[in-house]
Amino acid sequence: MNRIYTKTGDKGTTGIHGGGRVPKDDIRIEANGDLDELNCQIGVVRCALSCCVPEWDEILHGIQANLMTVMSLVATPAAERDKNPNELPENLVTDCEATIDSLTEESGPGLHFLLPGGTPIAAQLQMARAVCRRAERRLWTLNRQDPVPEEILKYVNRLSDLFFVMARCDLARQDWPEERWKAFAYKNKR
């Protein structure tokens, strides 16, 4: 019988891609933990959608699959990464940007900080945005110790923007007013 537990982590270490072991609070594991939490939060959003927005379910499913690859690559030290068989799509960042642009056209330009909330889906998307930002911070900390592929850093940065735009789009589709806090100073100076 195969068991889910191995007992190999009982002393505070965990395995990483390539066979090494690191402390469970190693920055690589912290970053992957935040990415895993983000993936779970996206799953919550997908459940909340209940297939009422099939094109969003497809987008979010793709992000979840990409995050699994991202986590595999993050779990692999840079010196061993060429041995990792998992690869991200070449158009990862540009596809994300295209989706952001398309949804921004639908909801209008976002020129304000918003209070998270509104519709249940918008609130869950704002939570995904916040978890994504935390994951991005951990990735940059890891990057100072062991280089993270630039594409991953860009992708996670774009994902937080995507979740913000999706939240705004859901509010617009539901004819729910945005609760604005303050204007983005850097965007409104242009």
Image (cartoon, rainbow, N blue to C red):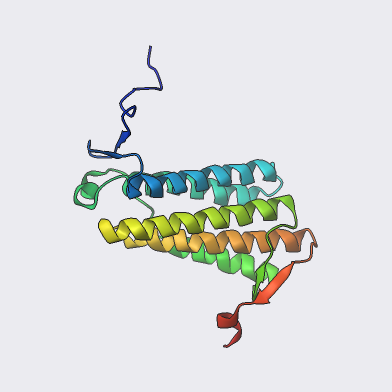
Can you tell which quarter of the image residue 151 is in?
bottom left
| Front one among 67 and 90 | 67
- Residue at position x 31%, y 29% from top? 11
| Front one among 97 and 119 | 119
Q: Is residue 165 left or right of residue 119?
A: left
| Front one among 154 and 104 | 154
How many labels, in total? 0
Q: Quadrant of the C terminus?
A: bottom right
**Is residue 90 something that shows in the picture?**
no
Q: Find residue 45 and report its horizontal and vertical position in percent.
A: 63, 46
| Front one among 181 and 108 | 181
- Residue at position x 33%, y 29% from top? 9
Q: Residue furthest bottom?
A: 190
Q: Find residue 58 and report its horizontal and vertical position in percent.
A: 57, 48
Q: Find residue 150 and report its horizontal and vertical position in percent.
A: 33, 62
**Is residue 2 something that shows in the picture?**
yes
